[in-house]
Amino acid sequence: MLKKAHYVALSDFRFQLARFQRFSERATRASGITQTQYLLLLHLRGFKARDWASVGELATRLHASPHGTAALVKRCVSLRLVTKRRSSDDARRVEVHLAPRGRRLVTRIAALHRDELRSLRSVFRIRHVGR
């Protein structure tokens, strides 16, 4: 059974999460891109072990359909945020890479997010709430 302290902790977390989301939406909009475009750039920049990702891998990270992600990538290509290349290892695979403009944008926006996350440090710490 949950105690009042559990509800308070969950409520505080959801409030701060929504606050961060609103901050993120404003920061990306002020930079001239959408929230989803920023997330695509962030997932490309943060992809482990290499500097590119496939559309399917990006779809997984975005919790989106491959078809919708392919359309998002196409829009980002037209905005010169990313580039697409056929894989040299497997010609069936398309690699999505950050373009210089996309790299500059994600670097600037991520720095703003890092600063905002620092202000929320205590909220995202796990506190023990009695059983």
Image (spheres, grey):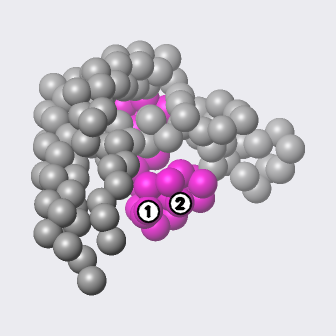
- Left or right of 74 on screen, residue 94: right
Q: Which SS does the magenta portion mostly show? A: helix
Q: CA distance from mark 1 to mark 2?
A: 5 Å
Residue at x 17% of width, y 46% of height: 16
In the picture, which quadrant includes the C terminus? bottom left
128 vs 10, left or right, is: right
Tag 2, which secondary structure? helix
Q: Is residue 58 magenta?
A: yes
Whole-percent x, y for residue 130 in the image: 31, 64
Whether the residues at callouts 1 and 2 have beta carbons within 8 Å, the answer is yes
Q: Is residue 19 above or below residue 110?
A: below
Furthest toward the bottom, the residue is 1
Q: Amino acid at mark 2?
A: Thr
Position above or below: 40 against 114 = below
Q: Nearer the viewer, residue 68 or 119?
A: 119
As shown in the figure, which amino acid type bears the numbered disc 1? His
Identify the mark at residue 60; answer none if there is no mark. Answer: 2
Q: Which residue is mark 1?
A: 63
Q: Which residues are magenta?
A: 55-84
